[in-house]
Amino acid sequence: MTSDNHTLLQITALSKHFGGLPALSQVNFRAARGQVTALIGPNGAGKTTLLNCLSGVIRPDAGEILFDGVNIAGLAAHRLARLGISRTFQNLRLFPRLSVLDNVLCGLTIQAGDSLLEALLRLPALRNRERRLKLQALEALDTFGLADKAALPAGALPYGDKKRVEMARAFVSQPELILLDEPVAGLNPEETAQIAGLIRQMRMYGKTMVLVEHDMEMVMGVSDRVVVLDGGCRIAAGSPAEVRVNPLVLEAYLGRMSVTA
Amino acid sequence: MGTWGKSKLFALRHRTGLAVWVLAVILLGTPLVITNPYNLGILNLIGLYVIVVLGLNLFIGYAGQISLGHAGFFGLGAYGSAVLTATYNFPAWPAMALTAVVMALLALALGVPTLRLSGHYLAMATLGFNYVVHAIFVQWDQVTGGPSGLSGIPPLSLCGLTFDSDIKFHYLVWTAALLALTLCLNLVRSGVGRGLAALAQDEVAAATMGVNVQRAKVLVFVLSAVFASVAGSLYAHYFGYVNPVPFSIFKSLDLVIMVVVGGMGSIWGTLFGVGLITIMPHLLDFFETYMDIIHGLILVVILLFLPQGFITGLVDLIKIRLARRRLAGSGSES
């Protein structure tokens, strides 16, 4: 399978079983560079499993994941992060005891370097780099409207703020691909609109995103393309307008209906 | 900006470095106040344990792992130096370095398979390691001198100065301890340190940030073993004598209690934890008689009420309280 310059992510025949249960069966999926591709489907459709395969949290059983033309299926999470894939989590996974700023700085782990000796000796190069990274993190906090909360422990923030800290942490390193797992779950309409605005803003900066979300209004508002999963299989794909009226999709969400034309 | 403002900014920016210097100056003058050799000896012992517990606290508090075997590394450091210098007349400093390198390799060999384990399994594996090490000290008579130990270990000397008294050793051990403290403070203020703090709180999230979780754990384990080994070597040269008793699994538990009192991941808290636990039995006979019971009680009570350890737990509580107050005060939009 070739990957043209337009396609950043090309998944072919991806499968994952848990015990005897298929979570993903032969799923094909494509995400275009600089676009927001939404992944929707009822609970248990395999959306989070797909994101987990993409971020190395779990290993797929079979299939190919071409990222920028390279097969990355089965690579460890930290190696995928190095390639420029970052993500947020459905149930927040902040580091609650670290400050908001340090949480976002964790998103710059790769840029910070991993030499133990350099860290122990705190060499001048490291000092300068730390200063630069701190500025970069503060900038991201500013973008996500958290500048005044940088010094607070992340665990003490209200839920909506935590969601935005996680997004800032995923975006701060300017990754190639960002996976957003239900970024507005549990948020009120006002906060949801704020997150949708941030996603649109990131898209304007040219970021490629894969969005898993249940809030259809939000999905339809920010996505370029929508892929629908049901029971581990891909059942539809297309523009938001096309997917909205696809009978297979309606059936998956609402149950079998007698479609009278 | 006035001079006052500038110096305030300087102090804020270099607060960690300044704090280490203040501590250094205090320790420089300590022997003028604590003149009693017995008390100075206790302070020296604190210095030795600070080195071990700093490393162990990185492993427990930062990497989020558990070791019940660090007295084993401490003991191997002591016996390594003792055997090399007393039995084989090896020069002391190279012996210390060689022992530390061997300890690093041993920790690497031990860490790579065992750090795939977690929780109870890792605790059991490290406990087993300490048990075996202690058994070797007791049983391998020809080399270790068995239960009666090894004597005749020469004191360390540097540039013609021999560290053969409590006061001289005070300066040596605390130089080493402050060096270890500085290294740890440097580490935790780096990306590597943040990666460790992150993986202690959530391994999956840390991995998706690019932290090589397995490598990071092994590195810190090796580092903590080297710290323990160097402290052990200093111990051997200070007392001139080693026996198996202070390197049993019970000492490992004491070291963990020091970490817990100091607080998981608190570098400065380590000084408090080591100080309190080391001084306690010397304060009152009561504490000495019932030491094990008191240690157990301290451990249980702290872990029940402040699972992050005493100092860290308190600091966290205060931070969260302040944060909540600020968020409430600013009428947070959510």
Image (spheres, coloured by chain):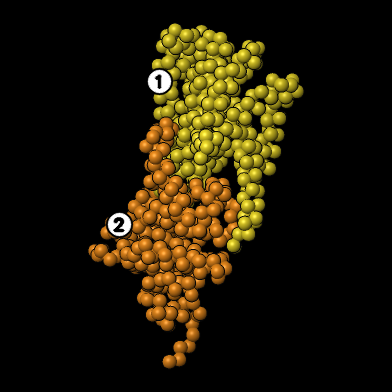
Chain colours: A orange, B yellow
Taking depth in this image into account, of B297 and B145 the one nearest to the observer is B297
* Dot 2 amino acid type: Asn
Q: Chain of mark 2?
A: A
Work out which quarter of the rendered image holds the N terminus of chain A and state it. bottom left
Q: Residues within 10 Å of mark 2 (few under 14, many from 20)?
A: some
Q: Is residue B14 above or below residue A257?
A: above
Task: Identify the residue at image location x=48%, y=72%.
Answer: A218
Query: Looking at the image, which residue sits at the far front?
Result: B2
Residue B142 x/y as whole percent: 48, 12
Residue at left offset 40%, top offset 71%: A223
Number of marks: 2
In this orientation, which residue lies closer to the viewer: A114 or A171?
A171
Query: Where is residue A172 shown, x and y percent of the image?
Result: 42, 53
Name the side, left or right, on which B152 lies relative to B95.
right
Badges 1 and 2: C-beta atoms under 8 Å apart? no
Which element type, helix, strand or loop, lies under badge 2?
strand
The residue labelled by disc 1 is B98
Mark identifier at residue B113: none
Residue B179 visible in image:
yes
Q: CA distance from mark 1 to mark 2?
A: 45 Å
Callout 1 crowding tier (Cα within 10 Å): few <14, some 14–19, many ≥20 = some
Q: In this image, A138 relative to A176: left or right? A: right
Location of mark 2 (residue): A71
Q: Which residue sits at x=54%, y=21%? A: B174
Task: Residue at 47% x, 30% y: name it.
Answer: B183
User: At numbered mark 1, what does the secondary structure look like: helix, strand or loop?
Assistant: helix
In this rendering, is residue A119 above or below B79? below
Please provide percent x and percent y for residue A148: 54, 53
Visible residue check, residue A57:
no
